[in-house]
């Protein structure tokens, strides 16, 4: 399957609007402070049990998309003004973030956001706040979590604020897993980390997906790593989905390479320019 | 020998008075921890709580019942504050919240006086503000019974709160919210519930502080200003620390009493009123986060 062209404003080529999509985002528009428009038209679906990557540069709208889904947007004076979001059959419109956690969706915010003054273990235990667990249950859950995050077991008594960036990212994901989510939203887990650590974290993400059956929507600037670990990908720019397709296809796509890796004779360019150039060359073909 | 005994007495009196400052400061710390807001209405809450308590007693309620009713009243005040002030201002800047608490202070002061009247009331806790005879006779120390009672009550309250924060789920939630409310919300910690709990706890602390202060100085409007003594306590101890509130209160108590007795005469007395603030200024220069304030963790 080839990467599909950018969707027309009226509709979009969302593939298989199937019965088993855990998340369906249907042409949403998001406005901050009633005036600043952040998303114009974003549609995407996450099939149950899959990993979907949301790619795009700074300010493209990746975080805003994730926060619309988790309803964290309200806390930042943002609002979904058009379109719908359906999670596991439930419209998310009137939910609060803690409702969403109750429904099994947890977001790992950009920049890790550990509770710096709490220990690593207290951070992870805090993740179980929405569940009523006994002391014994919590011990068992911690054991399960440390099975994936082996590095954290040794650091459990350290104050989270003084652990390394990689450990903080792991703490943040582990904390989210403690809520026993059906779906995780990961916002830039690779940010500011050495390649080795990025690989380690994505390995854990893969394992969680496989063994805990968590569906994952992943926002990343690190296109390569994200696509290599995802099943499907969406590219957004200035609040619109510009391109989508299976991860493998996108990974080999010349346009993606040109845009993100800057492999082009004319140097780095805007994704829209790439598409424009392409349509121009199509027009040229017609002329001849 | 009597010199040393006298000094000891001054220090002890200072420490006991200090626990009363600690108690008021504790109310500030609770709210500061949860919302990084300096609650200007804390003094008004002290006044509102104790005036209502005395009011209920005047209506004929027995001591214990009046106390319980006032506790529920303070929880209701906490709930109303959460719904009417905090929730609409959620995600606004800290400055906005600060201004809102100043407004809240006026509302609470006005409401209390409108309902219960403006005259100064006496509050008799059954503990006199005079030296305990046994201690005076056997140790030669003149220590006020009320001071001792206040110290014990404050200590018990502080220990209970510290244990709650350290070992309960709610406490963990509060500490998480104190560190990063956004991240706390993302894992399903209900901010509203935490806020409600914190404001209720601050209200109950205000009631106890108001009763102890009121028993000594009378239940009157001046309690609002007295509560501002908590400010130097917080600067010294740290705005976000319960142990800080305790130690800060003790330091202020001891320093102001000893200075008053030994240095005061050179200034013509009355330095009790301003010495704590001078001390606070030195602390701001030397250690702005306070003795126990949580250091701002920065990794580069």
Image (cartoon, rainbow, N blue to C red):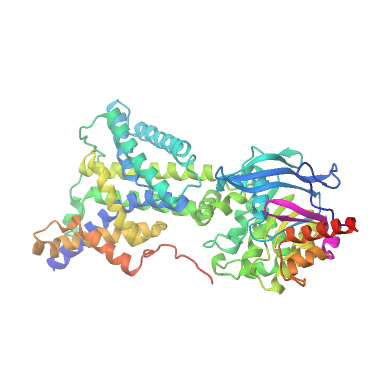
Residue A269 placement, left or right of B228: right
Q: Quadrant of residue A18?
A: top right
Q: Nearer the viewer, residue A272 or B44?
A: A272
Q: Which residues are magenta?
A: A234-253
> Is any atom of residue B244 visible in this view?
yes
Image position of A10 with respect to B228: above or below: above
Viewer-closest of A62 and B265: A62
Please state, as top left, top right, bottom left or bottom right, where the C terminus of chain A lies in the image: bottom right
Q: Give left or right: position of A188 versus B205.
A: right
Q: Looking at the figure, which quarter contains the N terminus of chain A?
A: bottom right
Q: Is residue B241 above or below residue B202?
A: below
Magenta-drawn stretch contains A248 = yes
List x then y, in percent, for residue A279.
Answer: 82, 56
Residue A273: x %, y % from top left: 74, 60
On the picture, is A179 further left or further right than B290?
Answer: right
Q: Quadrant of residue A174?
A: bottom right
Find out whether residue B80 is within the magenta segment: no
Total marks shown come to: 0
Q: Does the image show residue A231? A: no
Task: Identify the residue at horizontal 41%, vertical 58% (top origin).
Answer: B241
Q: Nearer the viewer, residue B118 or A64?
A: A64
**Residue in the image at 32% along x and 64% along y:** B284
Dividing the picture into quarters, in which one does residue A257 lie? bottom right
Q: Position of residue B105 (x, y in %)?
A: 33, 40
Most extreme residue toward the front is A288
Give the x, y percent position of residue A115: 55, 59
User: Furthest-top residue in view?
Assistant: B59
């Amino acid at each position: 399957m080839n990467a599909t062209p950018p969707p027309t404003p009226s509709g979009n080529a969302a593939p298989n609007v199937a019965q088993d999509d855990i998340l369906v985002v249907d042409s949403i528009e998001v406005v901050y402070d009633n005036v600043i428009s952040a998303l114009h038209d974003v549609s995407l679906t996450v099939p149950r049990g899959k990993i979907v990557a949301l790619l795009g540069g700074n300010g493209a709208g990746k975080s805003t998309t994730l926060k619309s889904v988790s309803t964290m947007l309200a806390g930042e004076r943002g609002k979904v003004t058009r379109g719908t979001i359906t999670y596991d059959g439930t419209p998310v419109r009137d939910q609060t973030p803690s409702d969403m956690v109750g429904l099994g969706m947890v977001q790992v915010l950009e920049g890790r956001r550990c509770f710096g003054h709490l220990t690593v273990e207290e951070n992870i235990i805090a993740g179980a706040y929405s569940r009523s667990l006994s002391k014994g249950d919590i011990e068992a859950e911690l054991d399960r979590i440390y099975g994936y995050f082996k590095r954290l077991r040794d650091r459990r008594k350290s104050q989270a604020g003084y652990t390394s960036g990689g450990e903080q990212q792991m703490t943040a994901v582990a904390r989210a897993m403690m809520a026993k989510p059906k779906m995780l939203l990961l916002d830039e887990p690779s940010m500011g980390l050495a390649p080795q650590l990025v690989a380690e974290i994505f390995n854990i993400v893969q394992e969680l997906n496989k063994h805990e059956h968590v569906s994952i929507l992943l926002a990343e600037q690190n296109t390569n790593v994200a696509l290599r670990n995802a099943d499907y990908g969406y590219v957004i720019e200035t609040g619109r989905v510009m391109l989508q397709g299976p991860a493998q296809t996108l990974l080999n796509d010349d346009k993606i390479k040109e845009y993100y890796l800057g492999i082009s004779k004319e140097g780095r360019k805007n994704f829209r320019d790439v598409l424009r150039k392409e349509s121009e060359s199509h027009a040229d073909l017609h002329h001849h | 020998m009597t010199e040393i005994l006298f000094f000891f007495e001054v220090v002890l009196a200072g420490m006991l008075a200090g626990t009363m400052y600690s108690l008021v400061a504790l109310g500030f710390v609770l709210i500061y921890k949860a919302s990084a807001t300096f609650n200007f209405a804390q003094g008004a809450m002290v006044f509102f709580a104790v005036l209502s308590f005395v009011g209920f007693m005047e209506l004929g309620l027995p001591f214990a019942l009046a106390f319980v009713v006032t506790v529920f009243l303070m929880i209701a005040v906490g709930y109303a504050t959460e719904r009417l002030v905090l929730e609409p201002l959620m995600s606004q800047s800290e400055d906005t919240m600060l201004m809102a608490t100043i407004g809240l202070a006026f509302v609470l002061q006005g409401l209390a006086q409108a309902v219960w009247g403006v005259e100064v009331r006496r509050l008799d806790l059954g503990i006199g503000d005079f030296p305990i005879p046994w201690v005076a006779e056997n140790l030669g120390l003149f220590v006020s019974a009320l001071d001792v009672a206040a110290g014990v009550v404050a200590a018990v309250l502080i220990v209970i709160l510290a244990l709650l924060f350290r070992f309960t789920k709610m406490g963990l939630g509060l500490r998480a919210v104190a560190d990063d409310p956004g991240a706390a919300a993302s894992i399903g910690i209900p901010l509203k519930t935490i806020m409600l709990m914190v404001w209720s706890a601050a209200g109950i602390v205000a009631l106890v502080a108001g009763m102890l202060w009121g028993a000594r100085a009378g239940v009157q409007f001046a309690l609002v200003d007295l509560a501002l003594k908590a400010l130097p306590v917080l600067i010294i101890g740290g705005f976000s620390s319960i142990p800080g509130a305790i130690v800060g209160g003790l330091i202020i108590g001891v320093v102001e009493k000893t200075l008053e007795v030994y240095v005061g005469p050179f200034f013509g007395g009355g330095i009790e009123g301003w010495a704590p603030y001078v001390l606070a200024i030195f602390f701001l220069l030397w250690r702005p986060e306070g003795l126990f304030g949580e250091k701002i963790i920065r990794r580069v």
